[in-house]
Image (spheres, rainbow, N blue to C red):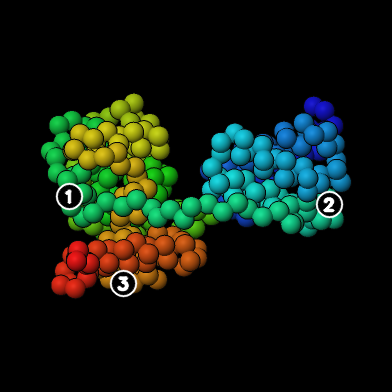
């Protein structure tokens, strides 16, 4: 390994160990940091930066321009810059560099997209089918659980049989940052899960995972995404992804309760500001009701 490559790659490796072992970040999160930082390391190498002191603001801006040239969207570039800034903060604290070359670098603005959600009627349509085989029984249980408890797809695939309370009313979830939370499980989800567990017994598996594939191994997030997409198309809906179910869970709860703090706890958000995006979705819902119901809400042509 060349000296130029070593000075960044080795320090990035130490930083990732720090994130995983000391900060307790999830494996998927550290891998995301790794991908971003390796891109930066490769670009720095191409600019002949062989030590920390040679990493200038110009090189950082050149890297960002290079990301744009690759048609990477602004939101992803924001994440790349955040990864780099976190790494250099670590480098400063460990005496590797005196200041960060990203100190004065600003992230590009990105469109403020609202998450896509399903209406309660869409959810009803998605689940309005009788499973014909073991896969569809499992798929129904997955969809019911994600929507019932607001889970991330990574959380759903990592659920183990032993994570339920005895009555299956509650489920222990290991979320981002290795934080554990207790979430309720609705009666429809409980029923679907019980049906799946009975069928699961017919599979030759020693895996403790709740959701397994036909080979008896823990199902992957990719498989869940593809199965839910196929199910939505089968039910006459546009493609649906697992995160839409999580967004729908939060939006429908907020529309009914208005209790943002409780929704924050159920979703496992560390900051209330992350949850507040659903107030905007709820506001849009109220506007639609107003425009549809109020006699003087809509303009008429003169």
Q: Give the quadrant of the C terminus.
A: bottom left
Determine the image quadrant of residue 34: top right
The residue at 72%/33% (across/down) is: 42
Side (left or right) of 101 relative to 110: right
Query: For residue 205, which numbered disc appears in the image?
Result: none
Q: Secondary structure at mark 1?
A: helix
Please name whichever residue, 122 or 110, is drawn nearer the observer in this view of the structure: 110
In this rendering, position of residue 84 left or right of residue 208: right
Report, in whole angstroms, how far the alpha carbon at label 3 lies from the one at label 1. 22 Å
State which tag comes first along the sequence, 1 or 2.
Answer: 2
Identify the residue at image location x=18%, y=30%. Answer: 133
Q: Position of residue 220 (x, y in %)?
A: 40, 35
Q: Position of residue 65 (x, y in %)?
A: 67, 40
Instruction: Pick whichever, 256 or 75, lies toward us.
Output: 75
Q: Secondary structure at mark 3?
A: loop
Residue 207 shown left or right of residue 132 in the figure: right
Residue 40 position (above or below residue 296) = above
Q: Residues within 10 Å of mark 3 (few under 14, many from 20)?
A: some
User: For the residue carrying disc 2, how many other residues have a C-alpha within 10 Å: few (<14), some (14-19), or many (20+)?
Assistant: some
For the point 59% across and 34% down, the residue is 70
Which sits earlier in the primary sequence, circle 2 or circle 3? 2
Please name the residue that numbered disc 1 is placed on: 124
Q: Which residue is mark 2?
A: 97
Q: Which residue is mark 3?
A: 258
Q: Is residue 224 depicted above or below 291 in this figure? A: above
């Amino acid at each position: 390994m060349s000296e130029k490559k070593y000075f960044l790659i080795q320090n990035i490796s130490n930083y990732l160990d720090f994130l995983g072992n000391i900060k307790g970040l999830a494996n998927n999160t550290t891998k995301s940091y790794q991908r971003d930082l390796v891109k930066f390391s490769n670009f720095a190498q191409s600019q002949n930066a062989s030590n920390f002191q040679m990493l200038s603001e110009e090189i950082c801006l050149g890297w960002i321009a290079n990301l744009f040239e690759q048609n990477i969207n602004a939101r992803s570039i924001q994440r790349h810059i955040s990864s780099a800034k976190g790494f250099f903060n670590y480098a400063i604290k460990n005496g590797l560099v005196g200041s960060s070359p990203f100190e004065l670098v600003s992230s590009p603005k990105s469109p403020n997209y609202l998450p896509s959600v399903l209406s309660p009627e869409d959810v009803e349509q998605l689940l309005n089918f009788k499973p014909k085989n073991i896969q569809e029984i499992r798929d129904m249980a997955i969809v019911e659980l994600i929507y019932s408890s607001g889970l991330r797809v990574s959380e759903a695939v990592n659920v183990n049989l032993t994570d339920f309370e005895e009555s299956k009313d509650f489920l222990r979830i290991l979320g981002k940052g290795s934080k554990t939370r207790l979430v309720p499980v609705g009666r429809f989800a409980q029923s679907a899960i019980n049906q799946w567990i009975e069928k699961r017994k017919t599979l030759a598996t020693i895996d403790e995972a709740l959701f397994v594939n036909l080979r008896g191994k823990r199902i992957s997030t990719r498989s869940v995404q593809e199965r839910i997409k196929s199910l939505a198309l089968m039910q006459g809906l546009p493609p649906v992804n697992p995160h839409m179910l999580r967004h729908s869970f939060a939006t429908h709860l907020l529309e009914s309760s208005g209790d943002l703090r409780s929704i924050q706890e159920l979703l496992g958000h560390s900051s209330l500001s992350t949850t507040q995006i659903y107030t905007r979705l709820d506001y849009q819902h109220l506007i639609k009701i107003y425009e549809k119901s109020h006699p003087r809400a809509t303009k008429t042509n003169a």
